[in-house]
Image: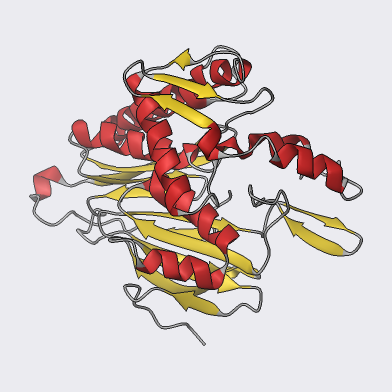
Amino acid sequence: MKTLLTILLSFFAFTGFSQERELVTVKKTLKLMGSPFSITVVAPSEELGYINIEEAIAEIKRVEKMISSWDEDSETCLINKNAGIKPVRVSRELFRLMKRCKQISDITEGAFDISYASMDEIWKFDGSMKEMPAAEKIKKAVAKVGFEKILLNQEMRTVFLMEKGMKISFGAIGKGYAADKAKEFLVSRQVVGGIIDAAGDLSTWGANVRGEKWSIGIVNPLSKDEIISRVPIVESSVATSGTYEKFVTLNGKRYSHIIDPRTGYPSSGIRQVSIFAKKAKFCDALATAVFIMGKDAGLFLVKQLDGVEVVLIDDFNEVHKSDGILFERKP
């Protein structure tokens, strides 16, 4: 998921520190987890800032090692290999993440589902698809999907996929989770402020060097150079899902890369969803779910959740938002 959020950074002294302790903003952009990441920290010096960034990178790579469905040695890959065969004992960290995924699947009525991975064999968004998948193939793939078929044994700390051919993937929550873990690590290292931008899943803390809270610009999905509005993010996270980058055009119709795991077909009706909440992993998962659920159901769900806000842009480029988001659309 490529970000459509513009990070606004300032380069002045951080309020509350003496002139002898002027802070600097240090930033590094690189590819992690197969996507562009940008890590920004506020530090006493460039040297220490880059050390902090390297520590964050190491933490992100650790998370990737655990949740990757491509790494043959990962816990996730082992779970998939044993689908329909036997339960797999996993680390406490992965077990907690799996529990959270099932909870989100439950509140979104399956719009978010990490067992959607079997659909990857049906829909391709790398330019190789030339015709619509056969309805029968989609039906067979959907039969392998279902969060209720993921059995978690709390006592044994095991995960079991009930049917052969089932697969899980953390593609719709993994980058947000990695951003959260990198932030937690840097906060534990007394880094006073920063942003982890995990391909559009942002986790923030503290303030910029001028003492101001971080802000984002919500961009028009039809024109990346046009900012619709600016929104402050205070000790919070944000994630955006949209159709602007990955899609396929078949028979003159454009299909989004965001697949409804309940039907096996691409979602429609929404161009972009931005979710604001405390944790990036929840923003990441919920942005995908709201995109799939549609405008009305998605807005209704967000209104039931404490500490969660949304900005949604529909296919007519109309902006819809929850009550806690305060901004005026620019003319």
Residue at (30, 54) in percent of width and height: 236
Question: Which of the pair 18/213 is nearer the observer?
Answer: 213
Residue at (34, 65) in percent of width and height: 304
Residue at (51, 38) in percent of width and height: 148
Q: Position of residue 19 (x, y in %)?
A: 11, 50
State left or right for residue 221 relative to residue 131: left
Residue at (24, 54) in percent of width and height: 207
Q: How has the structure been colored for display?
A: secondary structure
Residue 39: quadrant of the picture = top left
Residue 60: quadrant of the picture = top left
Question: Which of the pair 214/117 is nearer the observer?
Answer: 117
Residue 98: quadrant of the picture = top left
Q: Position of residue 325 (x, y in %)?
A: 35, 73
Question: Which of the pair 50/230 is nearer the observer?
Answer: 230
State left or right for residue 82 relative to residue 12: right
How many numbered circles does the render carry?
Answer: 0
Q: Position of residue 261 (x, y in %)?
A: 63, 47
State left or right for residue 266 relative to residue 213: right
State left or right for residue 108 relative to residue 259: left
Q: Position of residue 151 (x, y in %)?
A: 47, 28
Q: Where 58 falls versus 240 (above or below)?
A: above
**Can residue 245 be seen from the camera position used here?**
yes
**Can residue 32 be seen from the camera position used here?**
no
